[in-house]
Amino acid sequence: MPTSAKIDFTQLTQQIKDWGLSLGFQQVGISDTNLSQAEARLDQWLAHDFQGDMHYMSAHGLKRSRPALLHPGTCSIISVRMNYLYPATRDSQQLLTDPAAAFISRYALGRDYHKVLRNRLQKFAEMINQQIGDFNYRAFVDSAPVLEKAIAEKAGLGWIGKHSNLINRQAGSWFFLGELYTDLPLIADQPAANHCGVCQACIEICPTRAIVAPYQVDARRCISYLTIELHGSIPEALRPLIGNRIYGCDDCQLICPWNRFAKLSKEADFAPRHNLDQATLLTLFNWTESEFLSKTEGSAIRRIGYKRWLRNIAVALGNGHRTPEVITALRNKLDQADPLLGEHVDWALKRINSSN
């Protein structure tokens, strides 16, 4: 923390919010480090094994819920949000009803948000540093054991909805979160109030019934988990429910009534790349590995690798219509497939041959 005892932290808190807005964040809030309630909810979630193969959720002890253990000296957290829904994307509902189309979660259509927000947070920290002198901080963007949604809720950026995403009353839920852990004794904001009320639209719309109760998501059933986090075989019973979703799932956000207030992003980095907002399954399935690596450079999609990319598309093709082109594409991959991909291609061929 700066050595000067003359800092007016009430004034500094407001200045920090203003600086964040000037850098393109849509909202900046301040949280303290008491996450005891979130810690209890996390412990309960882990006790039910809802994390599936995401072993990292329990691998860091108390660092996730006790910020000062993760970054010593932390006494305040600056929480930010940035809208990502880009105006040029094809209508999601149209995509989901087109069996030939590939649906990719809207957050992953453009540049990797980790890079965009991390660079912006670094500029934010440097701006604060220029104004007050050196201070102790660390930036996070969904890349370390951080309870970002619980922190954002305490910082007044929104409330955690029944689908476990953060919802803002004026902006819906199509936004990314980031944090600066700091040693600055800033003035904490009031936590956001919950406005879900009796609505259960997200629970009812979930294709795989992953929202097992309000505010409780069993990741093992969640399409985002199955297509992104899961490294092995997708359970057969869940494959038909995935439809044409090949990377993530937005259904719970698409149905949320608060998203009628969602604000579109002006960040060029979030514009869809390589026509991913309107690509067909066959086009993406026919990418070579070098094409996949080239066209997903700088994208969050690359993290799943080529094999899981094809695994996901094979399932989606199996949920679509039987055409000569689809049969040929699947058989071509079957001839060169490793066991994991081969299993899903074989399933897809059997499914479309039996249901069309």
Image (spheres, grey):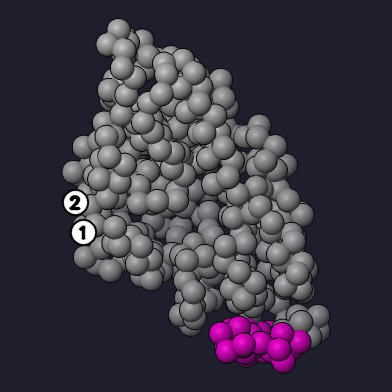
**Residue 239 percent coordinates (x, y):** 52, 76
Tell me the number on the disc at residue 44: 1
Residue 198 visible in the shown view: no
- Residue nearer the viewer, 330 or 310: 310
- Residue 40's mark? 2
- Left/right placement of residue 257 relative to residue 53 reads right
In magenta segment, residue 354: yes
Mark 1 belongs to which amino acid? Gln
Q: Which mark is residue 215?
A: none
Do the CB atoms of the residues marked 1 and 2 lie less than 8 Å apart? yes
Looking at the rendered structure, the kind of residue marked 2 is Ala
Front residue of this view, candidates 185 and 80 = 185
Secondary-structure class at tag 2: helix
View extreme (right): residue? 324
Based on the displayed image, in which of its 4 quarters is residue 300 positioned?
bottom right
Q: Position of residue 250 (x, y in %)?
A: 53, 54
Q: Quadrant of residue 209?
A: bottom left
Tally of numbered discs: 2
Q: Residue at x 31, y 29 (%)?
A: 183
Image position of 283 with respect to 176: above or below: below
Considering the whole magenta stretch, tell me its main secondary structure.
helix
Span shown in magenta: 331-356
- Residue 115 in the figure: left or right of residue 12: right
Q: Mark 1: which secondary structure?
A: helix
Instruction: Check if residue 184 falls in the magenta segment.
Output: no
